[in-house]
Amino acid sequence: MKKNLEIYVPNQKHKRIPFLNFLKITGAAVPLLLCFGMINATASNISGSNDFIVKGKLSDSGIKTEELKVMGPQQRNGKNIRGVVLDEKGEPIIGANILVKGTSQGVITDVNGKFDVRVPSEGSVLVISYIGYQTVEIKVGNRNDLKVNLMDDTEQLAEVVVVGYGVQKKESVVGAITQVGGKSLTETGNSDVTGAIAGKLSGVLTMQTTGLPGKTQSDILIRGVSSWNGSSPLVMVDGVERDFSDLDPNEVNTISVLKDASATAVFGAKGANGVILVTTKRGVESKPQFDVSASYGMQTPTWTPKFIDGYQTMSMWNVAEKNGRSFSKVVSDDILQEYRHPSTRLNSLRYPNVDWFDLLTRDFAPVTNANFNLRGGTNFVKYFCSLGYYHQGSIFDGFDDGGYCDTHYKYNRFNYRTNLDFNLTKTTTLSLNIGGDISTTSGNSQGNIWWYLYCASACNYPAYYPAWALEEVPDTDYPDASGKRLALAQGEKIYNPYSYLYQGTFNEYTASKLFTDLQLSQDLGFITKGLSAKAKVSFNTYYRNQSLTASWTFPEYTLMFDNIGTSLNPWVRDGEGNETWIQSPLDINVGGLQGDYYKDLYYEASLNYDRSFGKNSVSGLFLFNRHQNDPNTEYSYYNESWVGRATYDYAKKYLVEFNVGYTGSERFAPSNRFGFFPSAAVGWVASEEPFIKKNAPWLSLLKFRYSDGLVGSDYASSRWLYISDYSTSSNIIYEDAVANKDAQWEEAHKRDLGVETGFLDNMFTFSADFFDEHRSKMLLDVQSNTFLIGNNGFKQLNRGKMKKHGYELELGFNKQTAYGLNYKLKGMFSFNENRIVYKDDYPYVPNYQKVSGTAQGAKTGGSVSVDGGYYTSVDDIHNYPTTGGKSLDYIVPGDYKYLDFTSDGVLSSLDSYPIKGSLYAPYSYSLSGEFTYRNWEASILFQGVQGKYINFRGTFQGEFNSDAKRVHEAQVNYWTPTNRNADHATMNDPEIWGGYGSGALYGQQWRKSDYLRLKQIYVGYSFKPKFLVNTINVSKVTVYASGNNVFTLTNLVEGDPEQLDMSTDTSNAYGTYNYYPLMATYKLGIKIIF
Amino acid sequence: MKKYILYIFCLAGLWTFSSCTDYLDKAPSSGLTEDEVFGNLTNFRQFFDGVYNAGSNLNIKCAYNAYFQIWDQKASWDCLTDLEDQARMMRKEEKQATAFGQSVYISDTSRRPLLYAMFRVIRRCNIALQKVDQIADATEADKEDLRGQAYLCRGFATMAAVNVWGGMPHIVAPIGVDDEWDVPRLSPYDSYLGIAADMDSAYAAFQKAGLVRRDPGPGEVGNLNDTYQDRPNGVAAKALKSRALLYAASPLNNRAGQAAWEKAAEASWEAIRIALQYNYVLLPASDYYQNNYGAKYTNEQIWAYYLGSYAYNNGALQGMLSGPMAGQVSYWAGWNPTQNLVDMYETKWGDPLNTEEDRARAAALGHYNEQNPYANRDPRFESDIIYNQKSMPWSSYDASIGENKNVANIFYYVDPKTGKTSYSSMTSHSYVGYTHTGYMQSKLTGNMSVRNKVTTLMTSSIIRLAELYLNYAEAANEAYGPNGSAPGATLTAAQALNVVRNRVNMPDIGSRYTASRDLFRERVKNERTVELNMEGHRWVDVRRWKDAPTVYAGPLYGMDIQYVGKSREYPTGFKYTRVELEAARQVKWKDFMWYFPFNTSDYYKFKNFDTSSNPLWQ
């Protein structure tokens, strides 16, 4: 509320006095004002003008009554404008300020929100403002009536920033913290909070690796990768360490990300990877407000593989077989034609052409959301209650017997939350939070169905044998058999995906998460002013049960075409013996409790001090907590923290803050059980300095801040690193690995320098953060011991070192136009890169093959590398360095060349060297815009990364993998004598090579995967339908459409660029074995406020 | 109200501050201490048992010939030689290690981590030898038994590593974390001598323990039924010593010339003598198969490992049976003997058939017919190999394409009218796992098949008496000639060879082959290959003889068998044609193949341990 009315005060020239409050209206339609410093003020018209005389006592003088003259609208020129000011729900705003821009004329809205103001001309602009709402400027034009809707000012809400174990005013924050409000999360159309923050927080990178219903949560990195021991940030919901991926976005109030040591030191040995603080919505003192929202949407994969038909596949197969001189496997032209135009119906099964994705995916997967919440409060109790529902359906087909067995993937989630605050006494507040969700995840027990679809051959075997096959070729063992038969994936290692989907093997899991907090706050003002205390107990549980498992298996057959017309039965059942086969009944079971459950007990006690002495403000925090996490292991995890914070500021200009965490964990050696993590930060708000206010009034904000401190990470791949003894397993006694007697946490030394600026009353904002980090005492595996020792090796030692640096830039532009169009544009750009300073390399490995000195996530030694070229001729093959004489046997023109990196004339493992690039993008950016115009609102968000690489392996990079007669888009543009600038080497059959041969090479296996994605687009229209207002008291209805992941620009030929690994390697956690396509979602929704 | 809240705070504060010391003092109740492990016999045995049974395949079984549990292991070493076409496995020898990524074969504990397992075994043995006197409740015999096993297993494990990677340091004490681990290697010859010395130490200990043989001899109660029947004994120590010294004397390793052969001959004779003294016998021809299946243990096996009872469709066995036999048509190629191996089986009159000339000579005598090649062969041929028309009572057949009832139908038929080729039921090209050679094996699995679902006892002979005669024949021939014998020995080289031949009703070796060392050497090698075929010897033998470059130079053959109907020319109705196997199934010798490479990372950890004899296979 910085808008001032110019008030004419006799005897004192002109004095700017802010309007602070509006009291009441007298019957004479003359506003009654309370001016700053005046009490008992009355106002009266100066006759013959619109000006007022305000009379009242000045509070600082105590007695003297002053008279102020308030200039009214001028009468001589211009015209009168009438209007009404309403809030978002259409309720009138009483006391909103209407100012004619560039003049001192102004009025205030009356009890009906109405105003009447005189403007000089049609070109005049009205500035309409009210505390808590966004200020709007409107050009008058030729209108005489105006209706103005003021929007909630989220910036105002952001004035308070959630920090570790508390909140701070934004202006006094000296740590590197970014925050986003709940509204911008619900607009994303993403029902997963972890994905909804994508592109909204600078320095935060989200990576979604699968779209499997119920498993869509994104991995989050704050300021990039910091460690090879996991870089996941600590997540706290309402101050307690918890998972936030299953929260209903409607429940979220703010998400705040703490990035530097100043903000995270209080979390001690858990804060080094950054901290995400989520707060849920709480009640406010008001009439109950009901929100009801519902949406329905459709999801389609962001990418599906392009179908390469059987004819093309087999043509390429022939090239591969000829290259491998395996001529007996070459298919004749006649047969090749059969793949394209089968000459008989039966031949369409013998020479199939199966488009697996077309056959087995649906047009779209449905997604449904609904939420009901209630918010309000009295002076005794404030409440927020929410009930949410979320459903995500399957993109894949499945088997559904109409009863128990439905193998479609499905996820259903019910979220509930009740947050209550009781004011037990004037100084005592008791808060109770109960929140959680119940979800069922069900689907085919083959979680890796996408992998089967991707790898299966287009032309090795039919998807299934239709009923006519059995009519045409009877099964001599079962003459009565009829109907469709499942087909064996004959000649392949990969199972038939159609069979997998239609075998009816099905699991359903029901999970339940319950978070309960009880918190008591006591103001201890009676001891000393500004002191308060808080105690909190929190109990969390998570259980997951296999609530249903059903399986119904059907046999698979091979139709032996060679046997047709002989006395042998052409139908061969897989695993056939002499027994007569009988269909087994549907097998339904209920499984038990799954192993990933936990119980979690947390309690804390804290003392808070916060007080101002004139221009000096002081605050302090002392907090103690304990956390016992009890998962399905023999020994619970224990943590204990002692936390302290002290802040001081002078005149909101000079800021100092100290944070200390002293945290302990049972995971470390007794001598190193507790770690001490101090940090300090200073800030200077230059824009508060008089010389800047005077000389650069356009500079509305200029703030510098710097922080420095230590934080830790207690992640360890195994516990009890400090213990080594003999153990028994299956009646055999084993030596343990050698203990790390000093096992301790990783230590991160972080520094951060930040600048925040605002120009022209913060219409234009710019901020920048520069940071670096040195991590040490990182746990690493000892690599340098040898087989000769014959022991179990060593437990991990705290010897690793890494460093990291980078910057974040954020640019904002806010504008309210005179035409009623308000918009905000925001651009974020961040950069970070890391280097491994020390990791245990082998003692005699060449320097360029050492991991030390490369980036975590880079492609290092052990990788294969080529110079990017192809062998162009037989001469070329013979003149090129050989791989120990072997390769000549198999190399053909068109194969990739390995680079002789060492130039020793031999291609060997010594030629493997690190390739540039990293799995983790150094650059990420986003561009977003929010627009409101009258009843319309819209937002858009683009997010992208630059410099990212992806592991592109297995079936993705090489053809005919795992015996499958399958090629992919990445291989279609292959080398031929007439296509020498191909994207891919000539065709190879890995069965001949005994490996992936020339496929596993640079530029193929390690691919750039930069992308720019339209993450979010949203358009909403709000209105107030009369009949609903009258019947059920609806105050506002919003209908909207949203889309996310709408399109992606990328240079990656196949796969989703957000992945770390496109691989068909079953052992790879990030690979596509468990992949399920990421989804583009389009939703239509409605939101009703009562 | 306020007061109460204060009280609560105070109480909570008191409680938290007072109890913070022990909140984090949580650790698992410790496992066993050193004293507990080595102080009593039960625990000590549980520790030592890790030599045989430690998890993750890091145990001595990795070096047993036919220990099969997971798919790499059932390949045995024979599948990496000229004797077998097991497509995937054979090509592994040359190709697996060729990629830059190096061979997983070497350290991956889900495969056959031979090198890593052997040094685990050596460490356990050394710890046991160091601590055995700490056992409080053991008799001297118990201790000597453990000592004997420890020496023997240390030597055996070292031998397994030396065979495949070349000379190794003789590690006789556990290497501590602060000890130098980059130690120099011995030559293979010296390594084998060290192994022989370990075997002598083992024998001495077993002798003290009264365990030169664990079980009572044949015919006595308890024969082959000792609690520790699968553990080695004193005879095994001497038997393995004979093997070690034979390997040491072999051309690849010999550094002492004739003297090395003499030592080998002497050791072999000593082993035979002790084995006979403890009533080990060569099984009669009728029970010959029991050395591999069908009996838990035999009196021919000096040290063997009983695997258990396996059904035809056991996943591990399926790798030994071909697709049509195992009912797993979609991938197994099985063990398919090559024609090269089949040719090593002589006629029943003792005519060699290895070369064109050999076969012509046999044919001239009326002992062999190329168009009826399986008649009148060495009886071991019948028991080892499944060939076309071998009696197989359960086989299915289709008469229209020439298939016969109750025999193995391995051929194809070309319809003269349509020109269409039909494959018989056991060669169907619709199977990935069809035989490319025309043969399948039955030595290890007998008559199991998807159509004969038997469950059979499976045993791996680690060393058996027949090998000792062959060791002796080979060493004595080199040292003293075919008709010479080691000092104190009662058999000449030729006589020892004949013991092995006569047992399967083969005649004595022809006199023309005992005329010279060189001629006899070839027949010893042939006899050894046939007798010990599929028992994991060939890979080492062909290298230690330095024959590998020649053996792997020639092509591998299979038999092309076409049903043409009976005629004068084709008396069996089948036309047999030798064909070279496809290029992709051939083995080719490269100079780096004498020894296996190490895991790439190992090269970067050593300087004193010379890795130059183990270049990468690339």
Image (cartoon, coloured by chain):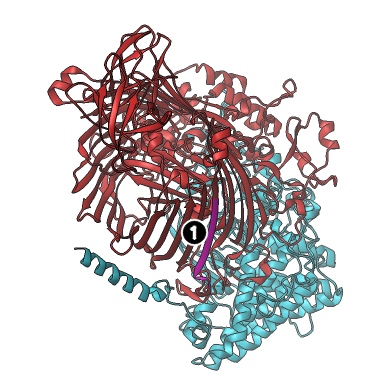
The quarter of the picture where residue A905 lies is top right
Locate the N terminus of chain B and report the quarter of the image it occupies.
Answer: bottom left
In depth, the one of A391 and A205 nearer the eye is A205
Q: Is residue A775 above or below residue A1077?
A: below
Q: Main secondary structure of the magenta part?
A: strand
Q: Is residue A197 above or below residue A790?
A: above
- Where residue B500 appears, as percent x and y from the top left, is 67, 69
Identify the amino acid type marked 1. Asn
Q: Is residue A742 left or right of residue B569?
A: left
Name the foreground residue: A152 vs B230.
A152
Q: Nearer the viewer, residue B528 or A187?
A: A187
Range drawn in magenta: A672-682
Magenta highlight on residue A95: no
Q: Which chain is red?
A: A
Disc 1 on helix, strand or loop?
A: strand
Q: Give the left or right position of residue B204, taking residue B2 as reference.
A: right
Q: Outermost residue, left direction?
A: A1031
Magenta region includes residue A677: yes
Q: In the displayed structure, would residue A969 be above or below residue B168?
A: above
Q: Is residue A257 visible?
A: yes
Where B257 falls versus A888 (above or below)?
A: below
Q: Which chain does tag 1 point to? A: A
Q: Name the side, left or right, on which B592 lies relative to A835.
A: right
The structure residue drawn at horizontal position 41% and vertical position 60%, both measured from the top left corner, is: A621
Residue name at image x 60 percent, y 91 percent: B208
Residue A112, percent from left and from top:
21, 22
Residue A987 image point, x, y percent: 66, 30
Q: Is residue A465 visible?
A: no
**Chain B drawn in what color?**
cyan
> What x and y, as percent, mark residue B547?
79, 58
Task: Sort mark 1 into few (<14), some (14-19) or many (20+) by Cα contacts within 10 Å.
Answer: many
Q: Which residue is mark 1?
A: A659
